[in-house]
Structures are given as C-alpha cells and as structure tokens.
C-alpha cells in the first residue's frame, strides 16, 4: 500500500511537471511566434524528449498548435573525444610526457596512457618527437620542437560549442579517430494553431444525460472523434489447452497413417466394454464403485449372437489355447449399460468388423474422446477425462514394435523422458504402464497403459492366428499438464478453472 501511494505521488508529480512545461512552451510560442523543439530544449536546459512529449500532449487537446517535423545532423563528442577535450590529444599527452632535456625511455612513454601507442605514432608523424634506438638503457624518445599547438583539442572544443566553421576534412579526420559521431536529430517546428491559447482546458470526451438536461453541454469543448483509432478488441472464442493438445495428438496420428475411429457413443454395453475384451464378469472394475451404470435404459439387447457365443465359451471353458476363467458367464451381466470406462470398447467393435472381412488387411486405428470412471478426485485424477487410444493390427507384431511406436509418438510431442513398467491387464499380455517425468511435480507420472491383445480376445472375432494387435491408451489431461506446467488437474478441468488461463495460455508447438 505504501509503495502504491509513493508511485501515485510520483505519477501526479510528473503530470504536474508536464503541464507546467506545456504552459511554458505556449508562452514561448506566443512571444516568438514559433519555436524549434530542439533549440528550445538546448536554450532552456530541458530534455528534448520531455519537450516533444509536452508538444504531443498539447496536440491531443485540440487545434492549439501546428507542428512540422524536420531532421538535421549534429556532431557530438564521443567518450574518448570528451577525454581529449579535457586532457589534450593523445599526441599532446605523449609530447608532454617526454623530458625536454634528457628524453624518456620509449617503454615509459608507452605507459603514459591507454592511447599512448596512438599518441606516439601521431606525434612522430607530426615531427614533434624522435626515437633514438641506440641510446644507453634502451630506445629513448626526445623532443624535436620546444612547444606544440594542439589543433585536435581546438577542433573538439569547436564541436562541443556548436561552432559550424570546422572544415569537412577536419570533421572526417576526427570521426576517423572516433573522437566525434554524427547524430540525426528529429525536431519539430511549432507555431500557433487556429485555436491557439496559453491556457489549456481539458476537452470533454463524453456527452452525459446531466449535460443535456442542464444545458451545460453548450459551454463545453468536446474532443473531436478519432475515426482512425483502434476499437475495443472484440470478445472471441479461445481454445482450451486440452483442445490444443488434442488437435496435436490427432495430427500426429494422421501423420503416422492412422484412421480415426467413431467414438460418438458415450453409453456402452458391458459386453463391448468388458466381455469382448476377455475381462471376467467378477472383475473389480465391473463393480459400481468403479463404474457408472445406467438405470434407464438399463440393458442392451442387440448383439452379434454368433460372436457372443464364442466370447461366452472362452470365458466359461476356454479355447484357442486358453483355459478360460471357469465360471458361469451370464448374459444379464453383459447386457448392463454403462458410461464407457475406456475407448477400448470402440477398438473392440472395430477389430470385430476387421475380423469379419473375407481377407485380412493390416490396419491402424486411433480415437480421442471422453471416458468415465468412478474415481476419487485428487491432483491427477478426475471421474471424467479424455483417453487417447491407438491400435495397430498386423502380422507378427511384438512388444518391441509397441515400445518403438510409443517413443516415436511422444517424441513428436516433445516428451522424451519415458519409462515402461510391467503391468497386468485382463485383455493384454504382455502389458506395460507408461510413465513420463513431470517437471512441476518433480516425479514420474503415469500417462497411459499399453500391451499386446490376448488371443482369447482376438481369435473369437475371426482374426487370423498369426495376426497380433498392439494397443495403448493414454490420458489427454496428464500430458497437457506436463506441457503447460499445471500441477493440479482441477486447475485444468472443472469449475475451478481460471478462464484467464484459457485466454492467455501459450500455443504448444510440436518439437521435431
């Protein structure tokens, strides 16, 4: 609070100084008829930019003054030139440092100043000194003249005083020695305008109902409309960080030759969500505390019955080289409707369609959509989130193919710190959890799951025995948190989101 008070006091002081300077300028124009802003600043000892600022503020009030800009060049001393003006030229300093009778060792002459070497060379060429290399004790410098006249210092004095009688050759010589520089000055010629006055009255910018009712508007001076001024930026839509990263994931999949799967059914049957994936009906994930089941409609009835019977057989008795789960599979349990817990249910439908074709053709599918799980909310978990899923079906695929494609996929997103951990999934064997290092949380965070689909899942669909399917499911929210440095997922999705974050978040660029 104290800082704001001090800052406000400083701002008020600056405004008062600007107003006083504007009045001084107007009085000078009234007395002289016009003025040059640069010459006025020099004569009054004021900063030229402050004078120009005051002129601009007067112009904003109305047609009080007229301004015409013009440019001209001036010569000014460099830091080295200022030193020469004060102490003499480098050659004069060297001459003064040479003993008039005994001379001075050349080594000592070179220690007279930082520019002694230049001064020595110039003094030699001017004929002021001579060098005796055969002198006792080493090379010695002697004076050749009794006194000198420092023309360089005289020229710099003339430049500093604004004397324009210096020849062009002399100016070039001083510039060559980096003693002066040429500067272009942009100045204004200011004269009286149509509404000239020495007292500034602030123009009114708004016509209020009170002015109209009282008639006070008749005595007011209104500021003219500036039709060239920029308007207020229109309110427009902004992409949420999730949507930006989603678009990047989608583009990466398309670049890698994947085909997008239809994912417009949030409601799924337990058969496609669990049973088709060789997930037993007693699995804990099928309990109400992990899954959102529907009451209306409670059940589904439209299934491919021949395929359903094969799934039932594999669960109850095994087959295709498997012993199965050895339990009584119930159709009523498979008919239950739910909010899909993963988009793998969509993958199961697509693989079944692929298996029904007369001739198998390798395929690559992907999906990015919403899934629902009855999770406990914390910094990295929500009950509703997006899942990114990729599926590749081809002959003789292995776990090495899966690891390679995951590395290639994440590298396109700029995420290269990956770890893989063995895991268990009912429908994949082998299975792996995928972890990425979160710089904000300073720890490894799980970003997805992956594996090779089991034969018990694929063969009932009608796929050939030598066809393998590798698949992975990745969260959209957690990679977005890593890319945008968000520590809590509830700051990214939900009612606690800061909308300004959506408006101002940076654009994510793919790292190639």
Image (cartoon, rainbow, N blue to C red):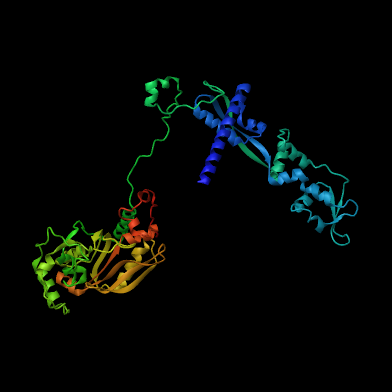
282 over 31 or under it: above or below: below
Seen from this angle, which residue lies furthest right?
101
Query: Is 439 on the left-hand or right-hand side of 20?
Result: left
Q: Is residue 312 visible?
A: yes
49 over 478 or under it: above or below: above
Residue shown at 28% from the left, 69% from the top: 450
Residue shown at 68% from the left, 44% from the top: 78
Q: How many marks?
A: 0
Q: Is residue 125 visible?
A: no
226 over 145 or under it: above or below: above
Seen from this angle, which residue lies furthest front?
2
State the residue in front, 394 or 42: 42
Residue shown at 23% from the left, 61% from the top: 372
The image quarter in which residue 317 lies: bottom left
Q: Position of residue 121 (x, y in %)?
A: 78, 51
The image quarter in which residue 16 lies: top right
Quarter of the image containing the C terminus? Answer: bottom left
Residue shown at 32% from the left, 62% from the top: 378
Q: Position of residue 223 (x, y in %)?
A: 45, 26
Q: Position of residue 493 (x, y in %)?
A: 31, 55
Q: Position of residue 258 (x, y in %)?
A: 27, 61
Query: Is 91 on the left-hand or right-hand side of 354?
Result: right
465 over 290 or under it: above or below: below
Query: Is 486 on the left-hand or right-hand side of 287?
Result: right
State the residue in front, 76 or 203: 203
């Amino acid at each position: 609070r104290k800082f704001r008070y001090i800052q406000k006091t400083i701002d008020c002081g600056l405004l008062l100084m600007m107003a006083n300077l504007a009045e001084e300028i107007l009085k000078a124009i009234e007395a002289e008829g016009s003025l040059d802003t640069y010459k006025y600043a020099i004569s009054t000892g004021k900063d030229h930019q402050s004078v120009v600022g005051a002129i601009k503020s007067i112009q904003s009030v109305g047609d009080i003054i007229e301004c015409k800009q013009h440019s001209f060049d001036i010569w000014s001393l460099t830091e080295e030139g200022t030193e020469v003006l004060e102490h003499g030229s480098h050659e004069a300093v060297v001459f003064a440092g040479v003993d008039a009778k005994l001379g001075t060792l050349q080594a000592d002459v070179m220690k007279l100043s930082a520019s002694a070497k230049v001064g020595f060379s110039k003094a030699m060429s001017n004929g002021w000194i001579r060098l005796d290399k055969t002198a006792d004790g080493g090379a010695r410098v002697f004076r050749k003249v009794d006194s000198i006249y420092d023309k360089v210092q005289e020229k710099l004095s003339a430049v500093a005083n604004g004397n324009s009688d210096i020849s062009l050759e002399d100016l070039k010589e001083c510039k060559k020695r980096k003693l002066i520089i040429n500067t272009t000055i942009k100045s204004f010629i200011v004269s009286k305008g149509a509404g000239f006055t020495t007292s500034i009255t602030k123009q009114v910018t708004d016509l209020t109902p009170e002015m109209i009712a009282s008639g006070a508007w008749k005595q007011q001076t209104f500021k003219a409309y500036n039709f060239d001024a920029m308007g207020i930026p229109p309110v427009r839509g902004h992409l949420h960080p999730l949507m930006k990263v989603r678009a990047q994931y989608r583009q990466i999949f398309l670049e890698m030759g994947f085909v997008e799967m239809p994912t417009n059914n949030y409601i799924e049957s337990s058969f496609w969500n669990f049973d088709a994936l060789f997930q037993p009906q007693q699995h804990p994930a099928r309990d109400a505390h992990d899954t959102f089941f529907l009451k209306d409609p409670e059940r589904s009835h439209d299934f491919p019955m021949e395929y359903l019977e094969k799934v039932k057989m594999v669960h109850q008795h095994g087959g295709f080289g498997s012993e199965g789960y050895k339990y009584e599979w119930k159709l009523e349990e498979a008919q239950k409707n739910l909010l899909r817990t993963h988009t793998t249910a969509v993958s199961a439908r697509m693989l079944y369609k692929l298996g029904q074709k007369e001739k198998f053709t390798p395929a690559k599918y992907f999906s990015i959509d919403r899934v629902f799980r009855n999770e406990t909310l914390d910094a990295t978990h929500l009950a509703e989130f997006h899942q990114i899923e990729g599926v590749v079906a081809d002959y003789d695929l292995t776990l090495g193919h899966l690891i390679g494609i995951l590395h290639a996929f994440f590298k396109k997103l700029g995420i290269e710190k990956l770890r893989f951990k063995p895991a268990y999934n009912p429908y994949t064997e082998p299975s792996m959890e995928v972890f990425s290092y979160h710089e904000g949380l300073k720890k490894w965070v799980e970003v997805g799951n992956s594996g090779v689909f089991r034969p018990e899942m694929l063969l009932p669909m009608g796929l050939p025995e030598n066809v393998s399917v590798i698949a992975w499911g990745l969260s959209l929210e957690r990679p977005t948190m890593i890319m945008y440095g968000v520590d809590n997922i509830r700051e990214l999705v939900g009612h606690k989101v800061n909308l300004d974050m959506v408006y101002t978040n940076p654009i994510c660029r793919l790292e190639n």
